[in-house]
Image (cartoon, rainbow, N blue to C red):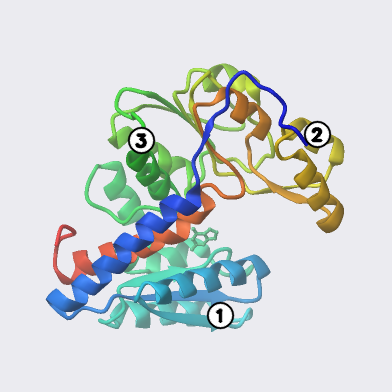
Amino acid sequence: MIAEKTGRSAEILSGKKFAKAIKEEVAREVSKLKEDHGISPCLVVVRVGADSASEVYVKSKVKTAEELGIISEHRHLPEDISQEDLLSIVGELNARDEVDGILVQLPLPKGIDEKLVLEKIDPSKDVDGFHPINVGRLSQGQEALTPCTPAGILDMLKRKGIDILGQNAVVVGRSNIVGKPMAMLLLQEHATVTICHSRTKDLAAVCREADILVAAVGVSGIITADHIKEGATVIDVGMNRLEDVEEAKGFFGEDELEKRLSTIEKRGSTLVGDVNARAAKEKAGFFTPVPGGVGLLTVAMLMKNTIKAAKMRRLGNVSE
Ligand code: GUN
């Protein structure tokens, strides 16, 4: 099928390419830590119960760690573990000196207080950056372990040389995992930051002011052509399933529609983000698609955070 002619087309930012660059740097740092200081960084990933998405994510985290020479341990705990027992396992990991990073995969089963578990993790080993101490340090501009997805997005913007200082950045979504830390990181880079959410009046008008637009709400296609300023950098963090064929026809340009329709036919749905892909490709300057965009950066940044945690805790700095 011949691609539909459009006036202009955004440059696609490939998460795979940026993730590869980050992982290569981490692998080099792992060797250096071992050679110069005799340190072998170690990451422990805790998974509770049988959530199938968590299983996929955790396997990818453990596999990537191994590929980069990071020692990794996967603790798979039963669905019916008590909160007390889980807290005591986290306490044991905190006490093990050879463990540099602890990640408890979310969501946790019903009946376990996520907040209590996350607060139990030693902040110096909190490679997710979810502990209130790290959230506070980030908001005060101090050295901190920061959440992997927004940290990966910032890393990508910098590698690409996209201007942040003085630019209007709009973050759609106020989650603790992406929206809020993304806003803080962009603010630290001197962007003028606006956070939008479900109660924002005239979302499109606010988004149209954005030089950098980050969408992280989990609503497929909420960002349309009406929300995008010509030439803006559009970062799509959404992960949604689109099942409706008619909706898909409005979502994709001729360049990918056929493939997407065939995926819906075969598997019942296709993975999409929060941004209407056709609109972004036509109006944005840079665009991270779903899949193939920022999702791949998250695991790479987890590895970078593990090295950062090892350096901060064992050497007292991150520049070594
Ligand atoms: N579940 C979905 N995303 C994440 C994440 O970034 N960290 C953890 N711990 N759990 C998750």
Residue at left offset 58%, top offset 81%: 81
Let me know if residue 128 appears in the view. no
In this rendered view, identify the residue nearer to me: 203 or 297.
297
Image quarter of the C terminus? bottom left
Marks 3 & 2, CB-CB < 8 Å contact: no
Q: Nearer the viewer, mark 2 or mark 1?
A: 2
Depicted 247 relative to depicted 268: above or below: above
**Badge 1 element:** loop
Q: Quadrant of residue 308?
A: bottom left
Residue at left offset 47%, top offset 48%: 176
Instruction: Say which amino acid is labelled 3.
Output: Leu
Instruction: Say which amino acid is labelled 2.
Output: Lys
Q: Quadrant of residue 78?
A: bottom right
- What residue sits right under mark 3 in the picture? 186
User: What's the CA distance linking mark 3 and mark 1?
Assistant: 39 Å
Classify mark 1 as within 8 Å of ligand 1 or not, answering yes or no: no
- Residue 83's spot in the image, x, y percent? 52, 76
- What residue sits right under mark 2 in the picture? 249
- What residue sits right under mark 1 in the picture? 82
Depicted 49 relative to depicted 277: above or below: below
Residue at left offset 37%, top offset 64%: 303
First in sequence: mark 2 vs mark 1: 1
Marks 3 & 1, CB-CB < 8 Å contact: no
